[in-house]
Image (spheres, helix red, strand yellow):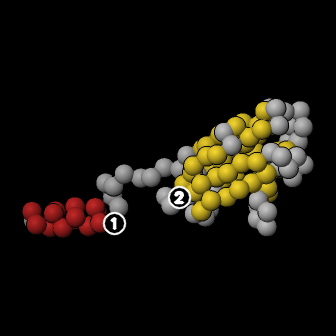
């Protein structure tokens, strides 16, 4: 009976029971005075990037040939990152506004 308990315990560990979960995080980028702050962030696949627009103008977070997030004035918008790599983004309406996300595996 005792060896059966150990086999069940080991199987539970191998299947992920008792192993700490990696939790997705929310990383906040503030848009204020026509800037992304911070301009460079680090994230992991599955994390959410949340842009908080404090300006009176609409902005975007746009990746050339990729995704785009519309961020209304005085509002918040978000995106879950899905791929490992470095992503440069900008505001389509104000191309001088630039940011970078470095995305690592979970």
Q: Where is residue 82 in the image (x, y as percent from the top left)?
A: 62, 62
From this viewpoint, is residue 46 visible? Answer: no
Which quarter of the figure has residue 3? bottom left
Relative height, residue 83 to residue 57 (above, below): below
Q: Position of residue 86 (x, y in %)?
A: 62, 59
Q: Please name the residue shown 29% across and 66% down the image.
A: 14
Residue placed most toward the observer, 83 or 95: 95
From this viewpoint, is residue 22 visible? Answer: yes
Residue 58 placement, left or right of 54: right
Residue for badge 2: 104
Crowding at mark 2 (Cα within 10 Å: few <14, some 14-19, many 20+): some
Crowding at mark 1 (Cα within 10 Å: few <14, some 14-19, many 20+): few
Residue for badge 1: 15
Q: How many labels does the image show?
A: 2
Q: Please name the residue shown 53% across and 58% down the image.
A: 104
CA–CA distance between discs 2 and 1? 24 Å
């Amino acid at each position: 009976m005792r060896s059966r308990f150990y086999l069940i315990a080991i199987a539970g560990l191998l299947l992920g029971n008792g192993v700490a979960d990696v939790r997705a995080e929310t990383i906040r980028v503030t848009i204020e005075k026509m800037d992304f702050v911070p301009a460079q962030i680090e994230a992991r696949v599955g994390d959410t990037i949340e842009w908080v627009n404090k300006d009176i103008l609409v902005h975007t977070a746009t990746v050339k040939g990729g995704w785009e997030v519309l961020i209304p004035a005085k509002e918040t918008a978000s995106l879950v990152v899905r791929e490992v790599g470095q992503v440069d983004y900008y505001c389509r309406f104000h191309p001088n506004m630039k940011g970078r996300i470095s995305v690592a595996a979970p």
